[in-house]
Image: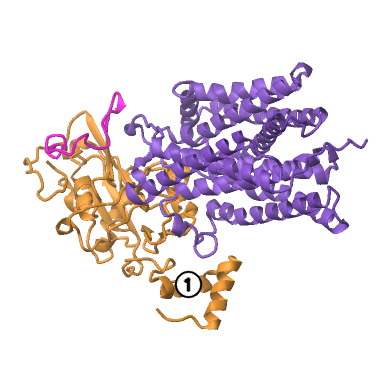
Chain colours: A purple, B orange
Amino acid sequence: MKETSRAFYVFITLMFIIALWGGYNWVRIMFIDGVGITGSSDFVPWGVYIIGFVFFVGASAGASMIGLLIHGFGREDYKPLGTRAILVGFLSLMAAVLFLMSDVGNPFRAMLLPAVLRNTTSMLVYTSMTYAGFAALMLGELYYAVKITRRGGVGSHMQEKMAKVLAILALLFALMVVHAPHGALFAFITAREMWNTPLLPPHFVVVAIASGISIMILVTIITSKINKRELVSMSTLIHMGKLLSLFLIITLFLDFFDFLVMNYSGKPGGKEIWHLLTGRFATLFIINTAGMFVAMLILVFKWGRTIKGLFIASALTVIAIVAYRINLVVVAQTPPLFPGIGEVYYIPTVPEMAVVAGIIALALFLYIVLTKVLPMEETVPEISK
Amino acid sequence: MKKLDRREFVKLAAVAGGGSLWSPKLRAVGDIIERITGFNPTKPEGALEVIPGARFVMVIDLGKCIGCRRCAYACKHENNIPDTISPPYIMVFETQSKTGVSGYYQPPKMTVKDATLMYTKLRKDKWYMPVQCNHCDDAPCVKVCPTGATYKASDGIVMINYKKCIGCRYCMTACPYQARRFNWWEPEIPPELRNPLVPMREEGVVEKCTFCVHRTRKGRNTRCVEACPNKARIFGNINDPDSEVSRLIASERNFRLKEDLNTNPRIWYLTRPKEKHMRWYKPLPPPKGIRGLR
């Protein structure tokens, strides 16, 4: 056990209180007042919970990506991040499932979903089926990572092999079974013009990896700062930044053609979305695209590849992706389905935001406590050339 | 409550754990769950016997609709729609020849003055467009419902099993007709004003127009058809070639809403000229016993 400072206790107490506050508000929404105190309406049925859900499902990809770099591509220099990445991935998935459970009107009935109640033409059934599998894979990874760390960084032949197999399986599972179907969940809805594009499943995969990597860069930099010791070497951090820039370029490329086709085809729905994105929701749209573009620029040029530059670029990416998720979920539902309905609004309410804050605080609390309790890789291994 | 024997327990465990078995086994699981918890998530609730060979459709004559919204109020009354659900199942849009859609989908206040119930004649420059659940043959809501709570009955009615609905609202995002309503609050209606034939919904489930299944499956018309003072709505069986709906769909100019989405809606709109019916009607008194009308 490492020595603990006062700031640590203050932080986890604060997180715990916010989580309790969120829990209280969840009980209020579900059992005391009614779902009506959220900002959603019959016109915008999906609100901030679904935004959180898609964001955290995406963030869980970071774990698998780092795992693949270590075990699939033999990047030994990433090893100090192994356990942390798995924890981030697992807790992101937990947060995503909690968001989904907060969103549904009947959470207890929803627990029967994949096993007892299922309609095989619904994407939501397949996505809900994947959570257990993905969580099991990540728990397996965590088990072997902890075992190997306990043995001083080098596991037995069997353990190393299992860690490798699980890491590769987890990435394949994450990309093909978890993220692409989440894109399809939206892409299959013909009624909403912004969702109904075949680009969405690949876009989901790319954005998921980008958000995962940027969160891992933030985690690395913050952990190094708190421990006053470098977690990984600078070259490893720069490598992560380069990877992030690659996925940002693909995201911007997909976005560009998505909006180009939407505008050029001149379909009324597409025009309406574009009108909203450049009008009422222009701020969000600028944060989304400009944020990604600036982050990409910082990472692409040599002058940006410092700790500060990497930190700013990753933070910008996270903010841009949150803005993108808001656009994807809320703005897509905002064009009224009939002109007579008029302007449709969605403004999240305080209890709803409290639940969101509570879920995020709970994930942070568990992350901090678990990194204290579980053995973490601390040394910076030499890069074997 | 009956105790489970070993065989049943193994069956339940296998099905609940495996999650990839087919529907007759699923029904068995539903029965077991019913024995334990008292409710069966796999059995449709409150559904009447389907009339064999029937295929219900509706025809709305836009040349006759006077925009009084009596259908919407009558529907609210008939189907136990609480005041917290707004708009009701039927939205009536007002359109004009020059500016397009101009009017609201529901009266801003539920008062006699605002309720447009006093509309008694066709207005020369105004058209009205009632929109409700289209009971599509290829309904997007049926496809996306994760639990199968929404299903297409063999008589063409898209129904909801309220006991299976988890309230994920996926169907609401998928419906191109804005036909679905979510119970954001616990629905409250005084027992003396309730229609006993229609089950009360609970908080957190989705509901919508059922083509008045409790009436139509017993050979009656829907309530909106009965409430329409100008007979703009016609309900019937499209499988019967002699029915009025079959005749109208075959002989009159008509369209369906958002046909490009291939949902195959079951409501046809007739675009007959209005002048044919342009005459004065006797002013009607406001209907009695409508909840929420002040």
Q: Which residues are magenta?
A: B94-121
Q: At x 23% / y 54%, what residue is drawn?
A: B80
Q: Is residue B273 visible?
A: yes
Q: In front: A60, or A122?
A: A60
Pick the front one: A33 or A281: A33
B40 in relation to A104, above or below: below
Q: Determine whether, in the image, residue A6 is placed left or right of residue B71.
A: right
Q: Which residue is mark 1?
A: B27
Q: Residue at x 44, y 74 (%)?
A: B31
Quarter where residue B174 is shown: top left
Residue B218 image offset from top left, x and y in percent? 25, 67
Q: Position of residue B214 (x, y in %)?
A: 26, 63
Q: In the picture shown, does residue B212 fall above or below B60? A: below
In magenta stretch: residue B110 = yes
Local SS, label 1: helix
**Residue A9, position as x, y percentages in the image:** 58, 39
Magenta residues: mostly which secondary structure?
loop
Q: Amino acid at mark 1?
A: Arg
